[in-house]
Image (cartoon, rainbow, N blue to C red):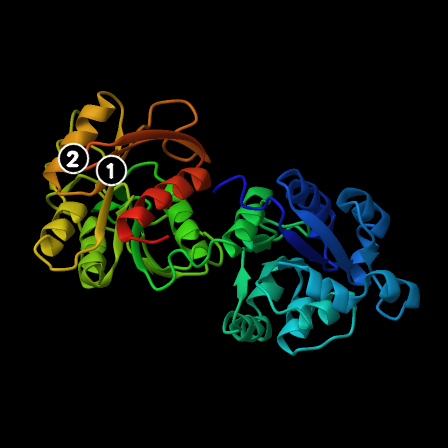
Amino acid sequence: MNSHVLQGKRIAVGVGGGIAAYKAGDFVRELRRQGATVKVSMTKAAQEFITPLTLQSLSGDSVLTDYFDASQEEKFGHLHLARWADAYVVLPATADLLARIAAGMANDAVTTSLLAFRGPVLLAPAMNTAMWEHPATQRNLAVLRATPNTHFVGPASGPLADGDVGPGRLSELNDLIDGVKGLFSAAQLTGKRVLITAGPTREAMDPVRFISNPSTGKMGLAVAHEAHARGATVTVVLGPVGDVGALPFEVVKVVTADDMLEAVMKRVEQADAFIASAAVSDWKPQTVLAHKAKKTEGPQTITVVRTPDVLMTASAKVQANAKRPVLVGFAAETHEVINYAKGKLTRKGLDLIVANDVSAAGAGFAVDTNQVTFIGADGTTSSAQGSKREIAAKLWDLVAKKLGAP
């Protein structure tokens, strides 16, 4: 996403009382590095994990900790913070803090200033997995998600400080920053419906073996997050990639290419843009054995047949429509990348294709970075490299123009 988005923006950062509070320092420093002005508020519990002096040093301004302190209220009170900020970010948004925000409570520096704030709010949850999954937390999240101007980033999934593994980690710094940037570009795709395929497919040989590929879905999910940040209504048809944590958009989980095709064909005509980033298996066994195949001496032969071409089938369905979606494909190749990508662009009737050499270091499957070439049906080309979220941002810059978005 554009590195100048935060230049001159005024960001209020409310710090909650969880172990992830120590990451607020890096977050504040990065906001300022990207040109934002930052003011911090803290709950009493947050001060047990990181000191106000630390955040004052990193933000370059006083920290609001006690709205009963007359000197703080006179110099930099909760109403002043609410009126000053262009956006308000809460991290970590603990289970307790989410509950109090959802209830409209105003009993500390963060909740009081936040309740008086009228602009966009970004909540970054972080807590133990059991607390995140508790029905009470989920009810509070439902209330907050239905609140105008309230957005979420995370939580991420993985090992937690207490030893548990699952959803509840504070999102990574780059994702947090991208979330803030999204607050200022959210109107671009408002009202647009986006359909995205992501991840691999699996084609069973027997009950325990399958044909697949190393795709983790990271690129497709980055595309989805970026579209969501820009205001689109997003649906992701997601192959088997394991736990991806809580996602702020609709996810349709599939396994096989046939499953993916069925899900896409039900939705593609209602989409304004269809981004086919999934690594669909090209072949499947002609026969799926009912029981696990046993090893025998010597070579064994498996007959494979083609799987359905999801993108080509979807493209053929909408080509004649008076209003069809913008069609975008991905070409993951290991040689003659541009030539193969151009052939796919023409053959499948696409508006844009994203070509990348998956054999190159720092690109392709199971990594967080990528380097690609965008090739348009009009013959235009451009290149990009960086994090997959940065690639996604540049992709949406191109697609937004085709959609007539500002």
Task: Quadrant for residue 13, please give it.
Answer: bottom right
Name the element at disc 2.
helix
* Residue at x 50%, y 53% (from the top left corner): 182
Q: Is residue 343 above or below residue 66?
A: above
Would residue 357 appear left or right of 287 to someone viewing this image?
A: right
> Which x, y percent locates residue 179?
53, 52
- Given residues 92 and 29, the one toward you in this image is 29
Would residue 106 appear left or right of 260 to someone viewing this image?
A: right
- Confirm or deny contact between disc 2 and disc 1 (CB under 8 A): yes
* Residue at x 37%, y 22% (from the top left corner): 360
Q: Which residue is mark 1?
A: 353
Q: Is residue 236 above or below residue 384?
A: below
Three-letter amino acid code at the position of disc 1? Ile
Three-letter amino acid code at the position of disc 2? Lys
Q: Is residue 203 above or below residue 265?
A: above
* Residue at x 26%, y 53% (from the top left corner): 273
Residue 189 seen in this snapshot: yes
Label 1, residues with CA under 10 Å away: few <14, some 14-19, many ≥20: many
- Given residues 240 and 382, the one toward you in this image is 382
- Given residues 185 and 367, the one toward you in this image is 185
> Which x, y percent locates residue 382?
32, 30
Task: Tell me the distance, in whole angstroms, between the alpha carbons under discs 2 and 1.
Answer: 8 Å
> Which x, y percent locates residue 184?
52, 54
Name the element at disc 1.
strand
Label located before the other in sequence (2 or 1): 2
Q: Which residue is mark 2?
A: 344
Residue 297 seen in this snapshot: no
Label 2, residues with CA under 10 Å away: few <14, some 14-19, many ≥20: some
> Which x, y percent locates residue 180?
56, 52
